[in-house]
Amino acid sequence: GIEMPLEEFDRLMCEQSEGKELKVVDGKVIAVEHEPTQVELLNLELSNLYVWFEEYDNQVKRYNRCQRLGIEYDKDIKQLDNQARVNANRITEIRKDLTLR
């Protein structure tokens, strides 16, 4: 194992709790910034796309309500629909990529 003073261990534990990774370099433990993996980045993008679709669904509901009530809708629904198609395709790509890993 690696021996170190308690103060050094405490400092490293604090840095780890702040999101840094602990690595052993030349027999010494150091804290480094976390570099996200490709899988983590894809999962983050997927999560952001799901959040976008939640807002899109809310906008579609608003649009439909405005249509029923004869009120003007303040956004471009065609632009939102086009973005939804792009985002849906991206979700499919990400899921496929994640299954291949």
Image (cartoon, rainbow, N blue to C red):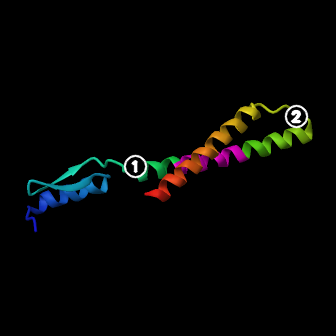
Disc 1 to disc 2, how far (Cα)? Answer: 45 Å
Q: Is residue 14 left or right of residue 4?
A: right
Q: Earlier in the sequence, mark 1 or mark 2?
A: 1
Horizontal side, residue 45 vs residue 85: left or right: left
User: Does the stretch in magenta take in 48?
Assistant: yes
The residue under the point 62% across, 43% down is 87
> Which element type, helix, strand or loop, lies under badge 2?
loop
Q: Which residues are magenta?
A: 46-57
Q: Amino acid at mark 2?
A: Ile
| Residue behind mark 2 | 71
Taking the spot 71% from the left edge, 32% from the top edge, the residue there is 79
Residue 45 position within the rendered picture, expressed as x and y whole percent measured from the top left: 51, 46
Q: Main secondary structure of the magenta part?
A: helix
Mark 2, Cα crowd under 10 Å, few <14 / some 14-19 / many 20+, is few
CA neighbours of label 1 inside 10 A, class few (<14), some (14 to 19), many (20+): few
Q: Residue 62, position in %: x, y?
A: 79, 42
Give residue 38's mark. 1
Q: Residue at x 70, y 36 (%)?
A: 82
